[in-house]
Amino acid sequence: MGLVEETKHDGSKHAKDTGAKAGQDSANSAGAEPKDRVEQVREILFGAQREEYDRRFGELEELIAKNISDVNSETTRKINALRNDYDKRLARLEELLISNISELSNGTSGKIDALNDVIEEIRGEKVDKAAVKKLFDQILSISRELDITTADEISNEK
């Protein structure tokens, strides 16, 4: 059978034979397989649309790939910026901690040295109540500065 084109005319369908004769059409198509004929008809009917859809899908695929690449690059950039900021802050905190520990250590060492000097003075002299009171006052003062709990405070807490 030949390729048939349907047209509407006055509300009824008419068939128009595009082949020369029905006999020639059947002779030409006899060698072709039905699968090939269906493909030919499909290509004629939908070929242009299919090509347009293929082109559009290709464009969409490229756009999606580009967007994914852009998002990936942006995310990597932001993560690196956050990592750098975190590293800087952490380094600064380490510096401050070391500085504070050093200051506390130096201050404590100085105060301990001062107490040792007072103790040495007392050892060399006859111990009197005023000297012992002076020593204990200094120890109490230093312990308050260092936030050390005294024996009186411990007994008061119980």
Image (spheres, rainbow, N blue to C red):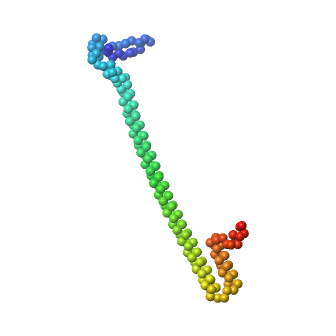
Report the residue at 62% width, 88% height from top: 124
Q: Nearer the viewer, residue 134 or 127?
A: 127
Instruction: In the rendered view, tell whether residue 119 sits above or below residue 35.
Output: below
Q: Quadrant of the C terminus?
A: bottom right
In the displayed structure, does residue 111 sit left or right of residue 129?
Answer: left
Q: For residue 108, what is the image quadrant?
A: bottom right
Give the percent coordinates (x, y) of residue 70: 43, 46
Report the residue at 38% width, 28% height from top: 50
In the displayed structure, does residue 19 sit left or right of residue 77?
Answer: left
**Residue 20 in sight here:** no
Give the percent coordinates (x, y) of residue 112: 59, 78
- In this figure, what is the number of numbered marks? 0
Q: Quadrant of the N terminus?
A: top left
Report the residue at 38% width, 36% height from top: 58
Give the percent coordinates (x, y) of residue 10: 43, 11
Q: Nearer the viewer, residue 43 or 9?
A: 43
In the displayed structure, does residue 115 sit left or right of residue 37?
Answer: right
Q: Nearer the viewer, residue 49 or 136?
A: 136
**Residue 15 in sight here:** yes
Report the residue at 70% width, 72% height from top: 152
In the displayed structure, does residue 2 sit left or right of residue 102?
Answer: left
Instruction: In the rendered view, tell whether residue 103 sits above or below residue 123.
Output: above
Q: Nearer the viewer, residue 88 or 13?
A: 88
- Outermost residue, bottom side: 125
Q: For residue 55, what is the image quadrant?
A: top left
Instruction: In the rendered view, tell whether residue 134 sits above or below residue 152.
Output: below
